[in-house]
Image (tube, helix red, strand yellow):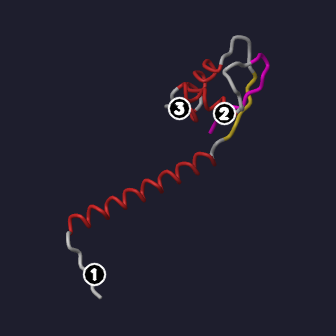
Amino acid sequence: MKLQIVNIKKFIRSVLIILFILVGILLCVNNTTQSSANVKYKEIYISNGDTLWSIAKTEKENNLYYENKDIRDIVSHIKAINKLDSVEIKMNQKLLIATM
């Protein structure tokens, strides 16, 4: 039995689409595994006047892990790591901050 390609343009287009999808999936899987393997955490303690926003701003400026990320995403990430329900923090509270 011989397989014959009737429309070569549709065939090439379909192969390219499948190839792009596979490459995209591989890049996503590789990115996720690599970034989670390199994450370390440091502990910080809340000082008078600290807010999650101010901590996120400092980390964005000084921490490569948060480089080029939006401050709102950094605040959400810090909340998630520390299992915080709100942005309220207390003096001398310990927080974990992701680093590389």
Per the rendered image, the range of residues in magenta is 90-100
Residue 94 in the magenta stretch? The answer is yes
Q: Nearer the viewer, mark 1 or mark 3?
A: 1
Residue occupying image coordinates x 52% and y 49%: 31
- The quarter of the rendered structure image containing the N terminus is bottom left
C-alpha gap between disc 2 and disc 3: 18 Å
Q: Looking at the rendering, in which quadrant would you find the C terminus?
A: top right
Q: Which residue is mark 2?
A: 80
Secondary structure of residue under mark 3: loop
The residue where tag 1 is placed is 3
Indicate the quadrant where residue 72 lies: top right
Q: Which percent across, then down, holds residue 99?
A: 64, 36
Q: Is the residue 81 above or below the residue 58 in the image?
A: below
Residue 38 drawn at (x, y percent): 62, 45
In percent of width and height, residue 14 lies at: 30, 63
The residue shown at (42%, 59%) is 22
Q: Amino acid at mark 1?
A: Leu
Residue 98 to residue 72: above or below: below
